[in-house]
Structure formats: C-alpha cells, structure tokens
Amino acid sequence: MADMIQIKGLNKYFGDLHVLKDVNLNVKEGEKLVIIGPSGSGKSTLIRCVDFLEEPTTGEVVIDGTVLTKKNHLEMARKYSSMVFQQFNLYPNMTVLGNLTLAPIKLQKKSKEEANKIAMAALERVGLANKAGEYPQNLSGGQQQRVAIARALCTKQPIILFDEPTSALDPEMVQEVLDVMIELAQENITMMCVTHEMGFARQVADRVIFMDDGQILEEGTPDHFFENPQNPRCKDFLAKILH
C-alpha cells in the first residue's frame, strides 16, 4: 500500500510554545491510525496540520504525493480529507440535511438532487435517516456527532480525521458514536483518530502512536501497545488509564 499521508520534520510553534517537535510519520492508504497521549501533548495540533487548519511552522505534510501549501490546501482538503471535531460544528440554522448537503453543493459543485441523495445515504449509514428534517438543537449530543460523521462521509474523501470525537459527549452516548466509527473502519478509508477511548484503539487501529511533549514516543500494533509498551512515559500513561 502506498503512503496516503507523509509528515516530514514537522514543527509547530504558537509564539514561544514549541507544540510539535520534528514529527515524522507516514500513514498508508486505508490505514487506521489512532493517536493517544496526555492533554497538551500535540495530538490535536498534529491532526489539524494534516488538514491545514494549522499551518506548520517548518516541515511539510504530503497528501497522496502532493505537498500541502498555503496556496493549495483548500483544494487539497476538498479532494482528500474531512474532519470530525470534538464540538460538532453543525450550523444551528440549517436542518440536518442542509448541513450535509452544504459542502457537496458549494465546494464540490454537485446538484441539489445529487447532494440530497448522497446525504440521505450517509444518514442511513449512521442510523439517522429519520432525522433529516430536524434541526441540530433537537438532537442529542451523540446524534449530533453521528450527523457530523455523516457530513464527513458526504464528501466521499479518502481521508477522515477525527479529533477526540467522543470527548464532548455524555458517557452513555459515547458507544453509539464509536459503533459508527468501528463500522467505518471496515472500509478502505484512511483514518487518523485522536482519542482517549482505549477499547476503540484496541479494536480498530492498525497502528497506535503515543505522543507526549510534541513528540511521538512509541508506536506499534494495538497488541504491542497494550501488552508490551517499551517507553517508560507510555507505560506510565497506560497504567493510569487502564487500571
């Protein structure tokens, strides 16, 4: 499998704060990569650099052989990647269907009819076809996040980035979102997912990376990670959350 995402010597500063420190990472086409680590370790910043929501200070991000730049990042995002955020980022003044058809119509120039068809198929997949005419405020947090995942599916891009998609949810709603993500993981979509859900990481990831202080300190299969981690900081982190 070819590399879909290559991150080379990536550094990111916010003022004097050095958030990403010379990060190198390749993600293969169709790979499910889960990123774990303590808060403030640079996980979300890394994933946001892949979508150019944050501009790298130095280093580069290469998507399917093309370097992301300030000039081409919108066009590349349109073609390759969609993001599911921690906060659902749905437009409150639009119905669920309106939220889902916006990008296909505006960015991908699809007809309204075609966009509606794609949106309904995506809602079907996340179990919310009956909510197409509802407004976001009438949905539970779990339903809103499933709508956000359906929105990401509507653009039919080969990469989906998840930035802690369950962390804003009530505990009983977490599983309904994870179930949708687990189902998606069966497909040939390249997934990068920042999460604290270790069961999900164990079940879905092809590879898990552990970040702390802006660096990747350990990477491996879920088995390696959860049974036999090597890095002391990683062992300590896992001991605290898996007790």
Image (cartoon, rainbow, N blue to C red):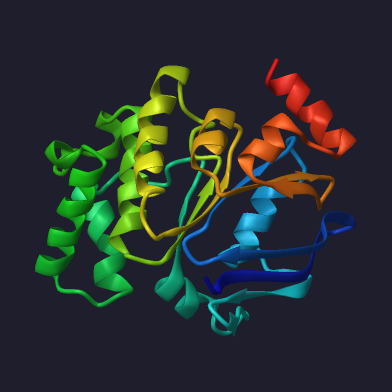
Image x and y of residue 237, in percent: 78, 29
Q: Residue 51 lies in what quarter of the image? A: bottom right
Front residue of 124/188: it is 188
- Along the line of sight, which residue is nearer the eye, 219 or 158? 219
Q: Residue at 38% across / 38% down in the picture?
A: 145
The image quarter in which residue 92 lies:
top left
Q: Nearer the viewer, residue 113 or 61?
A: 61
Instruction: Please indicate whether residue 171 sits to the left or right of residue 211 in the image.
Output: left
Q: In this view, does 56 lie to the left or right of 157?
A: right
Residue drawn at x 27%, y 62% as measured from the top left: 102
Quadrant (top left/top right/bottom left/bottom right) for the C terminus: top right
Along the line of sight, the residue nearer the viewer: 53 or 31: 31
The quadrant holding residue 13 is bottom right
125 to 160, vertically: above or below: above
Residue 201 as seen in the image, left or right of residue 7:
left
Q: Is residue 130 above or below residue 47?
A: above
In the rendering, at what x and y percent does residue 131 appear? 17, 38
In the rendered structure, the answer to whether residue 86 lies left or right of residue 134 reads right
Q: Which residue is drawn at 65% across and 71% down?
A: 6
Residue 88 is at least partly visible in this image:
yes
